Image: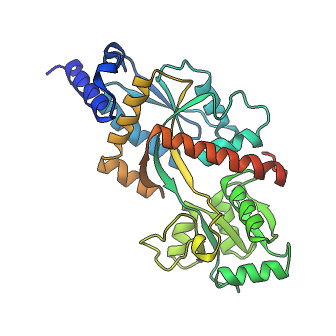
Amino acid sequence: MSPCMKRRQFLNYLALGSGIDAIGINVAIAQDFPSKPLRLVVPFPPGGATDVIARVIGKRMSELLNQPVIIENRPGAGGTIGIANVAASAPDGYSLVLVNAMQHTSSAFLYPNLKYDSLRSFQPLAEIGTLRYWLVAPTSSDIKDYSSLIKYAKNNPGKLSYASSGVGSAPHLAMELFMRQAGIQMTHVPFSGSGPGMTALVGGHVQVAIDNVAAIPLIKSGRLRALAITGDKRLDDFPEVPTFGQLGMSEFDVVGHFGFLSSGKPPQTIIDILQKTIQQSLQTQEVVSTLTSQGIQPEFATAQQFGQVINREYEKWAKLIPEAQIKAQ
């Protein structure tokens, strides 16, 4: 069977599998897309988690669609340079970007001169997984658990300091939201990334932090103590670590939702093809293993569901960032 025939059979399968009435499908569009290479923009430098994930999923998508998926790294300004590049592309489904919904939506309020609208300039395609955030303290400190942290912080406003990977970063925003909801005040000490921040925390130069993947090996090695974790349930690998909800902080909902966006509003048939292709990619062991190794829990969500997540994240940071007067540096 020719590659063209294989691709057409696959696209017909995608259309049927997505619950769309085959009679209503524009067959010409379904069979013609994709007729050329796709472009997947990574708005961060090569080698990072987003880059690694994009490359393994892009490889699988290329196999399924029988077209190259070309990875383009366009880093800078918290990811907004690469995202702006996609926003300026034709709305035909050939230009995609992998984003963390939290960072994507918060950029609308951290960078006042964006050349795109975080909601209207893109079409959500699918969510691929979630990233949890940990509240941690050095094992050598007097902060033994969540309650001791809250008690000390309330009795000593501003005396404790916390590390983040930079002003406006996800760990910074997460901690600002946590402090407001917990009714405590701590002093922010930004670093040039999670690595330096975790090093300072282990060394006792700061007392606490909220972070994600960078904290895990330090928890496993016993240098950091996990006080709480975001998400709706405990992790199997860390059954002793309670969720914020279990500690009475049910409204503190900070999770990194990773997913794909396309530029503009492509035809619905193309959206369905890309959504189903991403879903099929997540069923590959290599993709699952790669996401897990980067701290991402593989979780597929549809274009509509991912769009709802983005809207919720937008509303959350639209309130917090102006109130906290946070501006990206």
Residue 207 x/y as whole percent: 73, 75
Position of 6 relative to 190 (above/below): above
On the question of residue 263 being in view, the answer is yes
Quadrant for residue 244, please give it. Answer: bottom right
Residue at (26, 25) in percent of width and height: 12
Residue 36 x/y as whole percent: 39, 18
Residue 269 x/y as whole percent: 40, 24
Residue 105 x/y as whole percent: 66, 42
Residue at (83, 52) in percent of width and height: 323
Task: Identify the coloring.
Answer: rainbow
Q: Nearer the viewer, residue 60 or 124?
A: 124
Residue reaching furthest to the left: 1
Q: Nearer the viewer, residue 32 or 224?
A: 32
On the question of residue 46 being in view, the answer is no
Q: Nearer the viewer, residue 153 or 208?
A: 153
Residue reaching furthest to the top: 28
Residue at (56, 46) in percent of width and height: 309
Residue at (46, 23) in percent of width and height: 94
